Amino acid sequence: MLEKQLIKDGQKWVNENRGLKCSNEHYSSPRISSEIGDCSMPLTFDHYNWCSLQCQYCFAYFFKSNNPAITKLTLKAVDEKALINTISGKAKSKREKEMYEVFYKKKFLLHWGGLADPFCNFEKANRVGYTLMSALGEMNYPTLFSFKGATIFEEDYLALFQKYSAQKNFAFQASIITADEKLAKKAEIGVPSPTRRLEALKTLSDMGYWTILRLRPFIIGVSDSHLDELLGRALEAGIKGVSMEFFAMDARVSEGMRLRYEWLAGIIGVQGGADGLMDYFKKLSPSERGGYRRLNRLVKEVYVRKVYEFCLKNDLVFGCSDPDFKELNMSGSCCAMPDNHPGNRLLENWSRHQLTYALKEARLNYHRNGVKQKVTFAGVYGGPEVLAAGYLDSKGLSQDHVAVVGQCNAVRQNLTHRIILQRQWNNLRSPANPRNYLHGKLMPTGIDSEGNLEYIYSPMEYERRWIKEGVDLSIR
Amino acid sequence: MGFEQFFNISGDKVKKYESLLKTAKTENEKREFESALLVPVALPDFGGQRPTADAIEDLTARLVFANEEEAALFNRHFKVSQYVERSCHDLKLLIGLLQLVEEGKINYDARTGAVHIVVRETTYQRRSKVG
C-alpha cells in the first residue's frame, strides 16, 4: 500500500514536470559546500533549483523539505550567460569577482550535481546546461559531473562530449546503488535503470574520460545483495574509481521523509517501520556524531573491505566519503578523482587543504614508515601564510555555510570558513570535531603552538587484522 | 598502542558477525545480528588542556550598561541589531573617540567619570585674551 503510494507520488512528480520550462527568476549557484572540512571539491554547482528525478533516499529532498525558506515550487535556472562571463574573467558583482579570484582564475575543479541532477528531465526541456557545458569545453575548464539522468544520451550532448574527449577536461561519476533492476525501479523513480547508467559510463569511458562508480548511498540491505555484480559490470564499463558512502539518517523528519523511511525500513529489513529504522540507526550510530546518524564502522567493515579489495585487485582508485574508513582513500579526493591525471592536469586541481587528504597521508605515514602522525589545524587547512585554498579566508563566501544560520549579523559578517572550521576543530562537543566525526580515528593529544587542539592518527584493530590477512594498506 | 587495545574488542565482534551473516536467511535476521553485536563503543574522554578562545571571540566583547538611560544613549549612536541577540559591528564612532583619548585630546577621569575636551590654544589666542 505504502510502496504503491510512494511510487505513484514519485511518478506523478516525474510526469507532471516533464517538459516544464524555467521561470524568469534565476537560481544562485555555484556555492561553497558546507562539507568544506573534508571535501576536495567545495565548489559545488547545480544549474536548476530542483531535480526531476525521485530517488526515495535523496538527501537533497530531505534538506529542502526541512527548509522553511522554501515556500513555493518554482523551477529556476542559473543565469548561464552571467556565469560564463564570470568564469571567463568578466565578473560584475562583488561575489562574482571574488568567485573568479578564488576559483575560476585558478581553474579550480567544478563539481556539477550537488543537490540536483545535471542531466534530468529539466535539462532536456530547458537546455541551460548545454550552453554551459559547451562554454566549459571551450575554456578547457575542469568539471566533474555527478549524474543519473538520461539527457546525456541525447545526440548533441554526446557530440559535445565527443568533441572535447581529446582535451579530457570533463570527468563523470554515475550514482548506482544496486545492480538489481527491480529494486532500483522502486527506489529511484524516473531514473534510468542501472544498466542504462552503466551504458552511459561505458560510452564516456570509451571516449577516454575519467569515469567513477558513485556507490552512494550504500544502503545496507539494498546495496549489499548484488554488490559483486555491480562492481563487475562497472569495471566492464571502464570505470577508473569507486566512491562510496553509507546511507545516513537525520533525526529530524519531515512528513514526506517519514513515509520514505517507513518504506525504506521494509526494504532494509528493519521491523517497526520508520520508528524501527530510527531505533536501528540510533542504536548503531555513535552518539558523538549528533543527530545526523551514521552507522558505526563495525557495521560497514565487511562491505568497505569488499570494495577496497576490488579496487586494489583491479587498479582502481578507492574513494570513501564516509567518515568511517575515510583513511583508506587512495587519493586525497573521496570522490575518487586521481592525485595525478596525465590526460589533463587540470583535473588534479582540487583542494588538498582538507581532512580527507590529511587522513590519507597519515594512514600512509603509519603503514609505510610506522609513524603515528600528528595532525594540526594549520597542517590541514594551511596557516595564515599559506592561503592557497583562498576560499577559507573569505568573509563573503562563508555566508554559504550552514553554520552562519542563527548567528547575529556582527558575528556572521566576521566569519570565514577558517573560523568555522577552527571552532569545530577545537570544540570536542561538536559532531564535526575530527575525534567525533571520524569516531576515534584521530584522537586529541594536546594543544599545538598556535593554541589549537592537536590530534594523532590512531591505528585500529582492523588495520592489523587486514594486513595479517594479506590486504595492502600502504597504497597511495 | 593504547588505541589498538581499545579497539581490539571490535575485531572479535566483526569476525563473529561475518560468520553469523552466512547463516542469516532474511534481511531481518541480518539487522538483528547487527543490532545485537555491532553496537558502537563510546570514545574515551579527552582529559587534557582545551583551547578557550578563537579569532572571533578575541574580537568580541560584551557591554553591560549601568542603567537603561545609558543603554538607550548607546543605542542612539550605534546601530544595535535586535536579530537573535543584541549586537553591533560598526564601532567607528567609539573607536574614533578612544583614539582621541589616546592622543590626549580628550581627558577622562576614571575615578569621577568626568570627561572634558582638551583645548590647546595657540600663542596668539592666549595673548589676545591677556591683551
Image (cartoon, coloured by chain):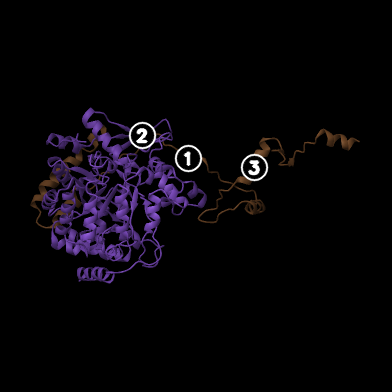
Chain colours: A purple, B brown
| Amino acid type at mark 2 | Gly
Residue B96: mark in rendering = 3
Please tell me which residue is depicted at 16% across the width and 58% down the height of the picture. A194
Residue A379: mark in rendering = 2
Q: Residues within 10 Å of mark 1 (few under 14, many from 20)?
A: few
Instruction: Answer above or below: position of A125 versus A218.
Output: below
Q: Could you tell me which quadrant the N terminus of chain A lies in? A: bottom left
Q: Could you tell me which quadrant the C terminus of chain A lies in? A: top left
What is the distance, in whole Å, between disc 3 and disc 2 at their CAs?
A: 39 Å
- Residue A401, percent across and down? 40, 50
> Do marks 3 and 2 share a subunit?
no
Closer to us: mark 1 or mark 2?
Answer: 2
- State the residue in front, A115 or A355: A115
Judged left or right of residue B23, residue A257 is right
Identify the chain of the residue marked 1, using the numbered disc in the image. Answer: B
- State the residue in front, B92 or B55: B92
| Amino acid type at mark 1 | Ala
Residue, disc 1: B55
Identify the chain of the residue marked 3, using the numbered disc in the image. Answer: B
